[in-house]
Image: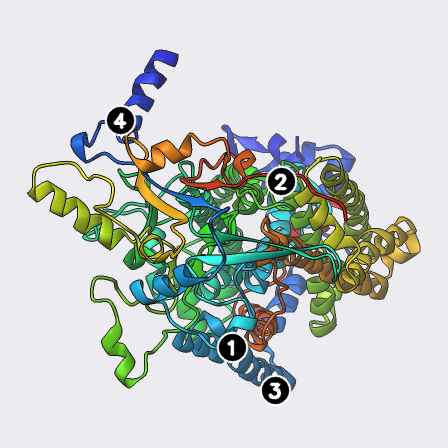
Amino acid sequence: MSPFDKLRVNGKPGYQTSPLILSLSKDEQRYFQLNKNISYKEINDDVIDAMTRTGPLYYVVLAIVTILTLLLFFLPWIYQIKVGQGVTGLNNPSYWGVYLVNFVFWVGVAHAGTLISAMLYITRTQWRRSVHRSAETMTFFALIIAVSFIMVHMGRVWNFYWVLPYPNQRTIWTNFISPLMFDVFAIGTYFLSSLIFLYFGLIPDIAAIRHRSAGWRRRLYVMLSLGWRGTDREWYIRDKAYMLFSVLIMPLVVSVHSIVSWDFALGIVPGLHKTVFAPYFVTGALYSGFAGVVLLISILRRVQQSSAKYITERHYDRIGITLLALSLLWSYLTILEIVMGLTSHSSFELEHLRYKLLNPGFAGLTALMIFSNTILPLSLSIRKVRVSITCQFIISIFILTGMWLERFLIFGTSLPRKFLPYAWHDYHPGWVEIAITAGSFFLFILMFMIFMKIFPVISITEVKEEWTDS
Amino acid sequence: MSRFLDKLFARFNIYREPGYYGKYDYKWTIVIDLDKCDGCEACVIACHAENNLPIVGEEECSKNRAFNWIRIERYVEGEYPDVRVKFIPILCQQCGKARCEVGCPTYATYHNQDGLNVQVYNRCIGTFTCATYCPYDVRHFNWFSYKWEAPLEQQLNPDVTVREKGVMEKCTFCIQRIRAGKDHAKDEGREVTDGDIQPACVQTCPTGAMTFGDLNDPESRVSQLAKSERRYRLFEDLNTDPSVIYLKRVMKQTKQ
């Protein structure tokens, strides 16, 4: 129970006006005192300054990123739509390539946002407060990119809406047995809920900055803040709704990536047809998602000087512990996956494992994956490494690389070695696939850069609460 | 509860049970006698001519993107002087429990009343799922919109569509000939009998290794051949229930 609950007048929260504050104990009085180091005004100023004061460097970087996104993501995609899927390196047995690797990767990255926002909110974990907005934004944008990769992957993308079940003049219905249909619903639900969740968190922040802005910003904020006045009742309702949403959104963390894994596990391709896939993918998703959060907040600290005040060693320490735990779990499931293959008594499965672990090309990649996902993160057990931002930054880059490789190894080694040896054919990504993959990262950076200047990336409300609480 | 479920499933299964489509209910089957097959690839050429398959060229073929709805797979056993070559024609097995049908989100591939997996090109959005799920690798994707040069477009079969880029396709058991044969039989007020319908590959096979017919008819040639001791089906342990039956006499390996 928080001390706020004691301050109810006629059953309604009334701590702002209530004289009851004097009747509180010493500890509880301290609870309401402002932190001496940072005042509410300073937090407001910091966040708004970060949004509105833009140096020339920002525009230079923005221009470069925009050009790179166009050159690497959109132009190759348009070229591919115009010419056909043949510009990729896909071939007859290996129909799934880098595009689906990227899709799984980005859905995975999207997972930490919900975990940090919802799960840690329910458990009242304090350190989430200053990083949760970045994580939620990451979720939302990563999902946009994941969905766009499904479209990049499709042969006739202009018909993508045929997977949506609605009464239509084509008199065809969608196939609800298909795992791809599960995907449509799982990702659609996740997309909408993470958008609403992000918006719920943003409302008080937008309201706080709307008075200090002018021009189009003011019009936008006034519209988006939905007439928020900050009354007790509004806070009460918002907190209720936020909590309710946290509970609703939490099962999605597990369900979305399980369903993504079923796309592959429900086929009978050796190497993909495994029951361990759902927990394996969920763990991998959270793992890469947390690494993504570390990467994002480290860059944020560097480019926005003020955020260094709010994202401290304490946060890095806690995230480091989480990363370590996820690393151990992921390693366990990886070993389990290999052992399941070895004990399957299926020659197809054994051939897939031989190809994955002993083939010189893939053996190197497998070794790199094990190194960056299992061995390197073990160093996070040392506190010095955890609190060092540089160390964590480097480790997260390795983890993200390793997790991308994990997905690549799943597709790259199972599909080229399907059942009939005559049809076996290796898969090498084409230049269009590599360009679009690289371009997707620039697209992510571009979206985040624009978001960062329009909305507060550090939650004003939650940071104030955190400084008050501690 | 279970009775309710049984009722529910019965409503769905009615479309799958033989007899629902009355006298037009067939189970098309191809029996391939591997002891007769000499691997001449005439069936491959016939299929290309019948079904408007594009010729993709050397470079695309080296990427495993050749359009062979039926292909002769060659397997070489042993070291050079003592070499054994085995070959087997692989075409769409028209599985009774097809994996590809499970994968497709838009019903572009579905099971029709004759037990065939039908591919509807217009519904296909190219998610590749069917091809990935297929254990026989018999599905082929239109990587580009293929063109036929000036006089060659005259030889395209008007009964078969020319597919555009981004669409999956596969062996149909020459469904255009099946439709024509069934229509013809219907006009004469009888059921389709042996020899009414012949897919291009069966028609062309010079050694008569391939036989096409209705497995539901106990008198048909395929039903007789399917009783053979030599019969087997490809990857039967995967529980896909294929409609293509191979006949092969398993010989004892003699050491030299």
Can residue B142 be seen in this snapshot?
A: yes
Judge depth for marks 4 and 2 and give the one in front. 2
Q: Label 2 belongs to which residue?
A: B251
Toward the viewer: A215 or A303? Answer: A303
Return the x and y of residue B162 as percentages of the image width and height: 29, 68
Residues tagged 4 and 3 counted as in contact (Cβ below 8 A): no
Q: Which mark is residue B58?
A: 1
Are the numbered discs 4 and 2 placed on the same chain, yes or no? yes
Please, which chain is the residue tagged with disc 2 on?
Answer: B
Question: Which element type, helix, strand or loop, lies under badge 1?
Answer: helix
Residue A231's place in the image compared with A224, above or below, is: above
Residues tagged 4 and 2 counted as in contact (Cβ below 8 A): no
Residue A335's place in the image compared with A49, above or below, is: above
Cα separation between marks 4 and 3: 66 Å
Residue A344's place in the image compared with A184, above or below, is: above
Judge depth for marks 4 and 3 and give the one in front. 4
